Amino acid sequence: QVQLEESGGGSVQAGGSLTLSCAASGSGLIGSIRYYCMGWFRQAPGKEREGVAAISSDDTYLTDSSKGRFTISQDSARNTVYLQMNSLKPEDTAMYYCAARNTRASGGVCYHHLGTSSQNNYWGQGTQVTVSS
C-alpha cells in the first residue's frame, strides 16, 4: 500500500500563492516516486473532479487552466511532489488531491492514467485551498 499525505493548503486572497506538498510513503512504495506517475487533482463543491497537473520522472503535464500559473515538481529523495500555485483565482477554490500510480510514462499519459478510476491509482485525503476575491 502507498500512503499519500497532502499539506500546504489554506486561505489566500486572489493573486496570492500557495505551495502544496504530497509526501508518499508505505510498504508498497517501490523505489522512489521518480518511478511513479504523480499528479494533482481538485474538486470543488458540486463539481466533478478535474485534473491539475502530473509528473513522471522529469516530464510534466499541466492542464490549460494551470499553464502559466502552476508548476509541478518533485524531490525524489524525499518522495515528495509539489504544486506551486501562483496568481490564484477564486475559481481555484477546491479540495486538492494527490494521486500516484506505479508506472512511468510521459507527463500527458501519466495524467491520463491518474484520471481513471483504476484500482492501481493511490489517492491522498486532500488539502483545502480557498481563494477569496
Image (cartoon, helix red, strand yellow):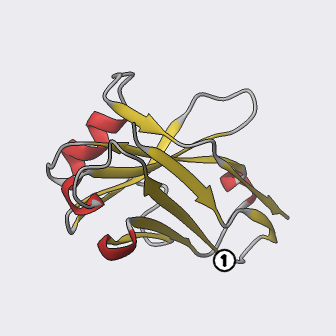
Kindly state the secondary structure of the residue where label 1 is placed.
loop
Quarter of the image with the C terminus is: bottom right
Q: Which residue is mark 1?
A: 17
Which three-letter amino acid code belongs to the residue tagged 1? Ser
Q: Position of residue 83 (x, y in %)?
A: 50, 67
User: Badge 1: how crowded within 10 Å, few (<14), some, or many (20+)?
Assistant: some
Q: Position of residue 62 (x, y in %)?
A: 36, 58
Judged left or right of residue 130, residue 22 is left
Quadrant housing residue 100: top left
Q: Position of residue 41 (x, y in %)?
A: 50, 45
Residue in the image at 80% along x and 70% along y: 12
Quadrant housing residue 32: bottom left
Residue in the image at 19% along x and 56% along y: 35
Vertical order, 97 against 87 (above or below)? above
Residue in the image at 30% along x and 71% along y: 76
Residue in the image at 23% along x and 48% along y: 108
Judged left or right of residue 132, residue 67 is left
Quarter of the image with the N terminus is: top left
Vertical order, 123 against 25 (above or below)? above
